[in-house]
Image: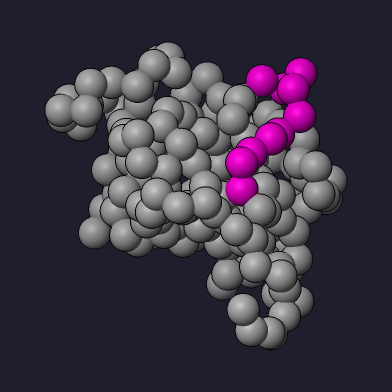
Amino acid sequence: DAPQIHDVGDDSVPALDAGIDSSPIGLGTCASPILVQVGAAQMDITVDTSLANHALDATCASNGADIVLKLRVPTQQPQLVYADTFGASWNTVLFLSDTCDKSKPPTGAGSVVCSDDACGTSQSQVVASLGLGYHYLIVSGVNGEGGVVTVHLQSTALGNGPLSVLPAGSGSL
């Protein structure tokens, strides 16, 4: 299934009953990000960083050219959002930010907002609890690496209880 993607010019959240805009897909820059509607259980988005420019500095790696995905959470209910680049043939970095302003460092509400070399690989994975509005997922390469990569994106609505981060490794609660 193709993701629901459209481009918007501002950070306001359109009315919840608004249909998908038929305007061109964004270019993957801060000025023209690729808009992704969060809420589909799973989607794959293929992007190419090889012709992109550098927009934002990652906090966990020295990154080069990047593609900007603008994630839209359309409901008041927070969404648990997961993304990875497993399967990429080059060293990737993923990071989440609430802004696409280069003067502000990337921030996020999740437990992992910047990832390089996840699970002993040269690929990346991030997970965060995102609230209503827009958030940015930046796809980049470490030390200037780049190319075609498929970003695997999953999301699910969170319940109404408190969110707790589980410790790494095995154990019992």
Q: Is residue 20 above or below residue 11?
A: below
Residue 93 placement (x, y as % from top left): 70, 53
Q: Is residue 142 above or below residue 135?
A: below
Q: Nearer the viewer, residue 19 or 107?
A: 107
Q: Quadrant of residue 72 in the image?
A: top left
Q: Nearer the viewer, residue 154 or 56?
A: 154
**Image quarter hosting the C terminus:** bottom right
Q: Quadrant of residue 120 in the image?
A: bottom right
Residue 23 placement (x, y as % from top left): 26, 24
The part of the chain drawn in magenta is 101-110
Residue 33 seen by the camera: yes
Q: Is residue 56 magenta?
A: no
Residue 131 placement (x, y as % from top left): 46, 36
Q: Quadrant of residue 54 in the image?
A: top right
Q: Is residue 102 magenta?
A: yes
Q: Is residue 34 left or right of residue 60?
A: left
Q: Main secondary structure of the magenta part?
A: loop
